[in-house]
Image (cartoon, rainbow, N blue to C red):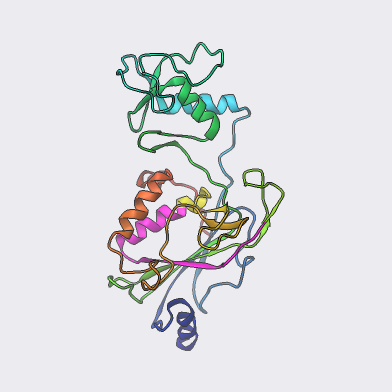
Amino acid sequence: MLKSLSGLWCSVKGSIQGRETQNNMRTLRSGRCVPGSAGPSFRVAGERQREWVVPNPPPVPQTLTSAVEELLQAYTTSDSNPPDEPCPICMCSLQCPSDCSSQDVTDDEGVVKLTKCGHSLHKLCARMMAESKQHFIPCPMCKTVHGVRLGNQPDGVMEIMTVNDDLPGFDCGTIIITYRFSGGIQGREHPIPGHPYRAHAFPRRAFLPDNERGNKILQLLEVAWQRRLIFTVGTSITSGQENVITWNEIHHKTEWENYHGHGYPDPAYLDNVTMELELQGVTEADLESNGNRNLE
């Protein structure tokens, strides 16, 4: 057992050897992918594993109009006394009609407030944003997400395990996240539908401290994974390769130590990744209402 763990840690931590692995591992699946289909299973003999099946995304209303109406009804309220300030979308005064569209729409006159952040904009401008996003309205002022932001992450596997070794700057053990993908064909939500995409440089591993804060961020990452927000298909910033699975604006610590700027210690990282998750619409409020886990 210890010999196999030493070999595992040579690949994960370089020269740092693992001393003891806790019996704690689980797998989250997205879409149709089954555990292990994107590569060999990252397991240690005798571990207990749980699989969390990610449900299908929320059903899209039958028409775009109904989806937009639901968003506007849920996340905006009428502002009967708007200030004489520019609308953040069309830049016209909020006390004047929107200059954002030539559509003959009479019931969109006026101004609305976004319910979460309280920022105001023309109702017509809010409608146009809802039409382009369908599942959510991002505030153009503070980026607060009203609704549920869904991404286009391909099918894959997210595995989580804990070990007793400490990250630099912590003395609490470590959470290891492993992401596995295989190549496939781009869907209509991707840049080039019908064109192949590749899973370059997978599996990828990331590390969090196994303390209260680290586990809270792990839960938020699990919500982001379920919403298909952690990865996307596009051009890799680091390699320049096109049509590959790449990170999607939620930074992970992929090094144990800070060899290339992607490891620990980094006192600001936990705050920064929490803010990045909030910009994607993933907050602690989602943890209280997240009933999407099916434990097996």
Instruction: Let me know if residue 208 is in the magenta part.
Output: yes
Residue furthest to the bottom in view is 3
Which residue appears at 51% of the width and 58% of the height?
237
For the C terminus, the image quarter is bottom right
Residue furthest to the right in view is 194
Q: Position of residue 45 (x, y in %)?
A: 52, 79
Q: Is residue 42 left or right of residue 288?
A: right
Q: Is residue 201 in sight in this rendering?
A: yes
Instruction: Let me know if residue 295 is in the magenta part.
Output: no
Q: Which residues are magenta?
A: 197-222
Which residue appears at 34% of the width and 69% of the height?
264
Q: Position of residue 274 (x, y in %)?
A: 35, 52
Q: Is residue 276 above or below residue 4?
A: above
Q: Is residue 139 above or below residue 159?
A: above
Which residue appears at 45% of the width and 87% of the height?
2
| Quarter-of-image position of residue 244 | bottom right
